[in-house]
């Protein structure tokens, strides 16, 4: 039996990836280039500046670090505008139920998201109170696949990593969970998340009773 659950946000709790993509697309268009749809997958779980660097692979123009900082801030402005439209209806299948079940069973719940917008997103989805601890992405030195963010969450919850279950939709996130010594549940396609201990299409397909005392 495991003692704590730690979730990724984008792709596990909410489909915020489409908003990230629209925001990157708008930025690229304004800068005079287009980004292909694979960018959507390539930036999953990747922090803001690293995502920008991926986007900029699709233009020949070079940007200074100061210009990149401005571009990242501009994209974030577009993203923040888009997530204002989020409501509890935007929770991914099973997410609300899983969070409420864990709450009722008093299982500590953490969030390990690369997003600096995690708190307003969870608030808009109506599930902010279902989390005992949200890692502040700004304090994370090494992003996924490094285990740092998942270890930080486990530490704050006061649960040994070996007793935590991590939920992730991105391969780098699964690696992060495994390197942290946790049980890894992949949410999405089996082929993509082959390293995870178990993979389910969505949280709605996960049977919590297999991992936790409910
Ligand atoms: P922000 P996750 C990640 O979320 C997204 O998948 C990734 O595309 C995004 O660049 C990153 O958050 C940072 O987001 O710009 O809001 O700080 O999957 O780690 O929850
Ligand atoms: Mg994700």
Image (cartoon, rainbow, N blue to C red):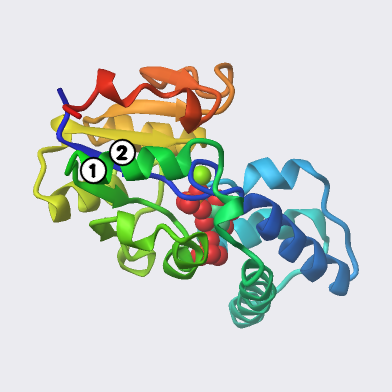
Residue in view at x 57 percent, y 23 percent: 192
Name the spot of residue 123 as percent of width and height, x first.
45, 67
Q: Callout 2: few (<14), some (14-19), or many (20+) C-alpha neighbours within 10 Å?
A: some
Name the residue beneath numbered marker 2: 101
Q: Is 179 in front, or is 203? A: 203
Say whether residue 99 is visible: yes
Q: Quadrant of residue 77?
A: bottom right
Residue in view at x 23 percent, y 57 percent: 132
Q: Is 153 in front, or is 181? A: 153
Tell me the distance, in whole angstroms, between the alpha carbons under discs 2 and 1.
5 Å
Q: Helix or strand or loop: what does disc 1 sit on? A: helix
Q: Helix or strand or loop: what does disc 2 sit on? A: helix
Name the spot of residue 152 as percent of width and height, x first.
22, 53
Name the residue beneath numbered marker 1: 104
The answer to whether marks 2 and 1 mark residues whose Cβ atoms lie closer than 8 Å is yes
Task: Decide if residue 58 is on the left or right side of residue 181.
Answer: right
Q: Is 209 in front, or is 14? A: 209
Say whether residue 61 is visible: no
Point out the image quarter for the N terminus: top left
Task: Decide if residue 83 is on the left or right side of residue 94.
Answer: right
Which residue appears farthest toward the front when viewing the image? 104
Task: Decide if residue 89 is on the left or right side of residue 45.
Answer: right
Residue in view at x 59 percent, y 23 percent: 189
């Amino acid at each position: 039996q495991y003692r704590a659950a730690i979730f990724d946000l984008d792709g596990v709790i909410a489909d915020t990836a489409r908003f990230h993509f629209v925001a990157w697309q708008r930025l690229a268009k304004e800068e005079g280039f287009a980004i292909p749809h694979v960018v959507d997958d390539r930036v999953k779980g990747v922090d803001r500046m690293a995502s920008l660097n991926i986007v900029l692979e699709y233009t020949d123009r070079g940007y200074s670090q100061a210009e990149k900082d401005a571009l990242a801030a501009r994209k974030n402005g577009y993203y923040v505008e888009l997530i204002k439209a989020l409501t509890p209806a935007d929770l991914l299948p099973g997410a609300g139920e899983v969070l409420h079940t864990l709450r009722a069973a008093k299982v500590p719940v953490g969030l390990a998201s690369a997003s600096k917008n995690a708190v307003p997103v969870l608030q808009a989805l109506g599930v902010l109170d279902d989390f005992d601890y949200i890692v502040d992405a700004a304090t994370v030195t090494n992003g996924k696949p490094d285990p740092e963010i998942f270890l930080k969450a486990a530490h704050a919850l006061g649960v040994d990593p070996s007793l935590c279950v991590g939920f992730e939709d991105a391969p780098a996130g699964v690696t992060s969970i495994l390197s942290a010594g946790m049980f890894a549940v992949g949410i999405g396609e089996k082929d993509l998340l082959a390293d995870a201990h178990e993979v389910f299409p969505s949280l709605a397909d996960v049977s919590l009773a297999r991992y936790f005392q409910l």
